[in-house]
Image: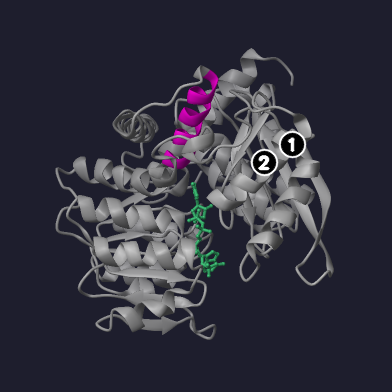
Amino acid sequence: MTVQTMNKPKSTSSFVEEFMAKVKARNGWETEFLQAAQEVVESVALVMDRHPEYAKAKILDRVVEPERVIQFRVPWMDDFGEVHVNRGFRVEFNSAIGPYKGGLRFHPSVNLGILKFLGFEQIFKNALTTLPMGGGKGGSDFDPKGKSDTEVMRFCQSFMTELCRHIGPNTDVPAGDIGVGGREIGFMFGQYKRIRNEFTGVLTGKAINWGGSLIRPEATGYGTVYFAEEMLAVKGKNLKGMTCLASGSGNVAQYLTEKCIELGAKVVTLSDSGGFIHDPDGIDTKKLQWVMDLKNVRRGRINEYVEQFPNATYTPVDPGLDHNPLWNVKADAAFPCATQNEVNAKDAQNLVNNGVQVISEGANMPTLPEGVDIFLDAGIHYGLGKAANAGGVAVSGLEMSQNSLRLGWSREEVDNKLKGIMKAIHRQSYDASKEYGCEGNYVVGANIAGFKKIADTMMDQGLV
Ligand code: NDP
């Protein structure tokens, strides 16, 4: 037995080591998947102690194995007549509580290990939302950056020509993720409809005219802020007047900034893969509108911000540095919203040293395990992605409900439901952390609450 710091679990380390050795033997090169699995296994070791029936039924062994993995060729032609071949994937990880649900990522870094990590996280995240959605994830190593609209369309059509055989409104319902926004969802929806001759809610993140939900574009960013507010409320605090750091400048970062402005907080940074901007005056509504136009319409780079707003500075990424200077800007709250593993131990230490009080993750697994330990040891409010960013998939679930009902709810109705769901996620995670002796440790709490729902359901459904 190892006894760790106060708000961490006293877990049976030999169980974790033995279990992870088996997972590593099977999935050795899938670094991100192993990282995600390690965190969940460490958290749920205590549950396994209390529930020998889960061990007997090999629930954990089954949970780490996807139900199905689909990999396919995606040939497409660029505007100059040259043929390209990308790889497409869909990982259908777990359908215990509903149809597979999770985004599609188009980014050159995409490989099976990354999609397995994202699909695995999605199982527990979706369970926490209280909605009936299983876990899945997919995508391609295609890079939409620098491609024309017609190239993106041809790629999306080719991708969906194969994917449409494997998905459906009651089977598997993909959404967007990095590199997949409204434009890509539109092209893929059009191709699905054309091939299957069906107008159904097979994708979420659709535009409002053809089956989308109000608040879906905003949901992940808004939800991440709502989760931060819930964590702060435990100590009677809120975000008003706080200086906030955000990374990324895509869908999640944009709407997170919007909600922070609305709540009286000041976001002073945004980034992309080239570097970050620091605007000490804060990004107000007008500046945010400009960023939205830059990123979503003109598809430009964040360094253009400083030409428009000269009080801000731009710092390019320096690959030689052992930390990201964005996380060394003094602030009260931090919201990583770009990608996995963007906050290392040094970054985490810088944030803590600078007095940050709350971290809420818009991105999936943005903090490395050593960084997470630093946050937990410092006793700050740390909301891990699978709880904090679940608002996106939650409103996707609400989009599915509206599609089934063939009606649309008002903005206010959806936003209220989103707030209620984020509250419920916080409550379940907090209660589970308390029940297992680690009050306020949302890593342990969220993993346990999500896992128990999946485990109980799998027990009900027999050996599947
Ligand atoms: P977008 O494609 O809209 O934006 C991604 C942003 O992150 C861009 O600014 C991008 O910069 C930056 N970024 C991506 N990869 C890297 C990298 N390797 N290094 C540095 N910066 C990078 O994606 P989203 O905003 O939708 O997604 C952001 C994160 O939020 C992801 O982790 C995603 O999984 C997670 N998430 C998204 C949800 C959603 O509803 N969209 C739901 C839940 C989680 P650049 O343009 O230079 O690539």
Q: Which residue is mark 1?
A: 194
Residue 364: x %, y % from top left: 51, 52
Res 41 quadrant in image? top right
The kind of residue on which mark 2 rests is Gly
Expressed as whole percent of the image width and height from the top left, the position of residue 264 reads 17, 54
Identify which residue is drawn at 32% across, 28% down. Answer: 413
Observer-nearest of 153 and 419? 153
Q: Which numbered disc covers residue 190?
A: 2
Q: Amino acid at mark 1?
A: Arg
- Residue 73 percent location from the top left of the image: 84, 53
Magenta segment, which residues?
Answer: 391-404
User: How many marks do you count on the picture?
Assistant: 2
Task: Report the quarter where the C terminus lies.
Answer: top right
The dominant secondary structure in magenta is helix
The answer to if 399 sits in the magenta stretch is yes
Q: Could you tell me if residue 397 is visible in this image?
A: yes
The relative height of residue 152 versus residue 449 in the rendered view (above or below) is below
Mark 1 CB near ligand 1 (8 Å cut): no
Label at residue 412: none
The residue at the point 60 percent across, 29 percent down is 201
Residue 182 versus residue 36: which sits nearer the camera? 182
Real-space Cα distance between discs 1 and 2?
Answer: 6 Å
Residue 15: which quarter of the image?
top right
* Residue 27, above or below 247: above
User: In terms of secondary structure, where does tag 2 sit?
Assistant: helix
Question: Badge 2: few (under 14), some or many (20 or more) residues near its Cα, within 10 Å?
Answer: some
Q: In the visual, does 292 lie left or right of 134?
A: left
The answer to whether mark 1 and mark 2 are in CB contact below 8 A is yes
